[in-house]
Image (spheres, rainbow, N blue to C red):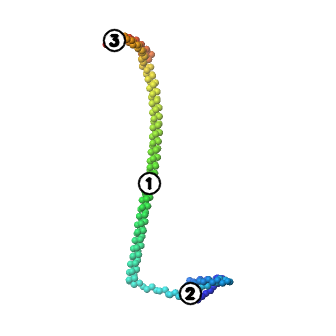
Amino acid sequence: MGIQCSVRDSQFTQRCRQGEKDGRVRQTIMEDDNETTLSKQMEWEKMPPPRKPKPPGDIELASTKIQAWWRGTLVRRTLLHAALRALIIQCWWRQVLARLQAKRRRAALELCAGQLWAAVRLQSWVRMWRVRRRYCRLLNAVRIIQVYWRWRSCHTRGFFHGSYELTTSQLSLELDIFLGSQICRITDCIPFPIKN
């Protein structure tokens, strides 16, 4: 059965489309000088009526159960393998992350320890410099005090001043002993040879 319809005829096109749902449609386009015509040939096939399923037998039920069990076993085995592979990858990735974290932690600790060591070293140098400066000031003060104390003790206790003259026959001594405000003068001549 052949049907020809014009492009302008929309109702017939709709009917042709409705017919496409039921059977097979072959579409051909023919061009004339005046207008383009659309030719659709529909071949109607009679669909066989649906079969009614017959009740399954014992063998078919048993084979269906065995097939279902085997497919379930295969699916469970596949899922188990996939879960094990995922677990292996996760364990490996966790180890990599733990190594990276340990490396970062060690680098942070080394940096902190280096900074702490530098700070302690700097503090020790500053303390050493301050203690040394204080020690030098105290040493200078001690020297000044010692000089003044020695000068005072010499003036308060006294000191000796003297001269001697040595000749072939005798030794002449002149000693002046200053004790604060008192002066003691000793003059003596000792002849040679000295006899005990």
Would you say 45 lies left or right of 165 here?
A: right
Q: Are marks 1 and 2 in contact (CB under 8 Å)?
A: no
Question: Within 10 Å of the Cα at label 1, are there few (<14), some (14-19), or many (20+) other Cα atoms?
Answer: few
Question: Within 10 Å of the Cα at label 3, are there few (<14), some (14-19), or many (20+) other Cα atoms?
Answer: few
Q: Residue at x 44, y 45 (%)?
A: 117
Q: Which mark is residue 121?
A: none
Height in image: 82 above or below 130? below
User: Which residue is farthest left?
Assistant: 196
Q: Which mark is residue 103?
A: 1
Asked which secondary structure carries label 2, the reply is: strand
Q: Amino acid at mark 3?
A: Pro
Q: Are marks 2 and 3 in contact (CB under 8 Å)?
A: no
Q: Residue at x 57, y 84 (%)?
A: 25
Q: Residue at x 33, y 12 (%)?
A: 194
Q: Amino acid at mark 2?
A: Glu
Where is residue 71 shown, x and y percent of the image?
Answer: 41, 75
Where is residue 177 shown, x and y percent of the image?
Answer: 42, 16
Q: Residue at x 46, y 86 (%)?
A: 52
Where is residue 1 shown, x and y percent of the image?
Answer: 58, 89
Where is residue 15 shown, x and y percent of the image?
Answer: 60, 84
Q: Is residue 15 visible?
A: no
Separation of marks 1 and 2 at Cα, in angstroms: 77 Å
Separation of marks 1 and 3 at Cα, in angstroms: 97 Å
In this figure, which residue is indicated by the disc labeled 3? 193
In this figure, which residue is indicated by the disc labeled 2? 43
